[in-house]
Amino acid sequence: MKNNAKLTAALEWLEIMVGCVVLAAGFVFFINPYNIVPGGVYGASIVLHNLFPSIQVGTFGYMFDVPLLLLSVVLLGSKLGARTLAAAMITPAIMNFISSLVYPDAAALQSLDPALLLGGKFDLSDHLMLSCIIGGVMIGVGSGLVIRGQATSGGSDIVGMIMQKYLGIRFSNAILMVDGMVVLFGLLVIGFGICSEDEVTADASSWYLSFYSLISIYVISRVIAFVISGAKDDKLIFVISDKEMILLHKFILKDMDRTATMIKSSGLYTGKDKEMLMLVAKSREVSKIKMKIKEADPRAFVVVTDAYDTYGEGWKVLPNKGDIMPE
């Protein structure tokens, strides 16, 4: 048991480290150079970098994270606080390190000019939609891996966890709310051109960045939910028949290696006893089940609907208190 616990902890720490690298790379290559503001600490840091270009985006991240980390330790627990402390301290450092490698000099690092990124070989200025989507996916994957390791990269993740725990708001929805406020901040500074004197006055195209930012935020929230909870493709099937469907029973138990629940039921109009089966299946299994139902009873009444979440033997484990549930 102790060895299993150690292995689980090691895998969680590995997820955290990989997540930090993916998250930082997503910002450096696809978000920061184009002034896209995908919410959170680093979105606010991008906006502040426009006001104070001599300070790197990652460095601003440290300035936000410290007070939020204190809240994390107090409100979310010491274990999460310790892991979050590691992730939040590592991510800005990785971001600053990668940035220093991909820009040729200090002036380019201050301007974050995409034309200078990797010698101009990675300039997506004419493909902002592609940049915001890929960046959003990378940030979502990185954040999701960190959260699966029972940590957070800091910033809006911490706020989202607190809102979920104490206000009952879904984690991904809480992230959307917080990040929306950051986008408004970006619109004021970048869209309206409220920048330092050294910055170029914003033109009409700067307004578009806010819309790209909203797209990134949506992509990030969906990817985080997917990484944490996986695809929600389970189906709930109800089968009601006037007769005992032995053929269907054998198919479920032997061919599918699954079970189902038999529920006592009767027709409201006829008052006759009926057999009702309730089972959960994967989407890819539904067509085979329907064909087998028709063999067992062509007149059966069948309802197939989405199973929002499925817990129990053979499915997901019920969450523990304090676990992150994005949906």
Image (cartoon, rainbow, N blue to C red):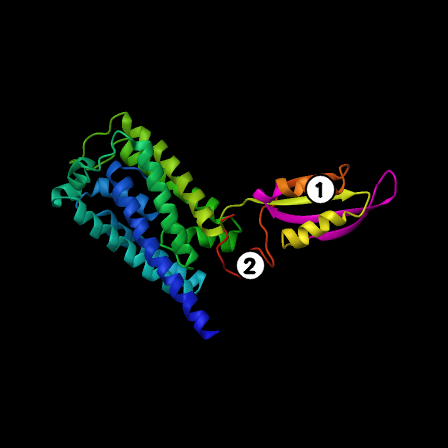
Circles 1 and 2: CB atoms closer than 8 Å:
no
**At 25% across and 54% down in the image, what residue appears?**
94
Q: Where are the magenta residues, as a range?
A: 259-286
**Would residue 101 appear left or right of 23 to someone viewing this image?**
left
Instruction: Indicate the amino acid at tag 2.
Output: Val
Q: Which class describes the residues within 10 Å of circle 2: few (<14), some (14-19), or many (20+)?
A: few
In this rendering, the count of numbered labels is 2
> Could you tell me if residue 308 is visible in this image?
yes
**At 29% across and 54% down in the image, what residue appears?**
91
Look at mark 2 in the image and give the residue it sits on. 317
Instruction: Indicate the amino acid at tag 1.
Output: Ile
Estimate the x, y position of residue 254 in percent, counting from the top left. 66, 54
Up/down of 205 relative to 38, above or below: above
Residue 267: image quadrant is: top right
Disc assigned to residue 216: none
Kindly state the secondary structure of the residue where label 2 is placed: loop
Kindly state the secondary structure of the residue where label 1 is placed: helix
**Would residue 25 appear left or right of 84 to someone viewing this image?**
left
- Asked whether 211 or 52 is in front, the reply is 211
> Could you tell me if residue 55 is visible in this image?
no
- Asked whether 149 or 182 is in front, the reply is 149
Look at mark 1 in the image and give the residue it sits on. 293
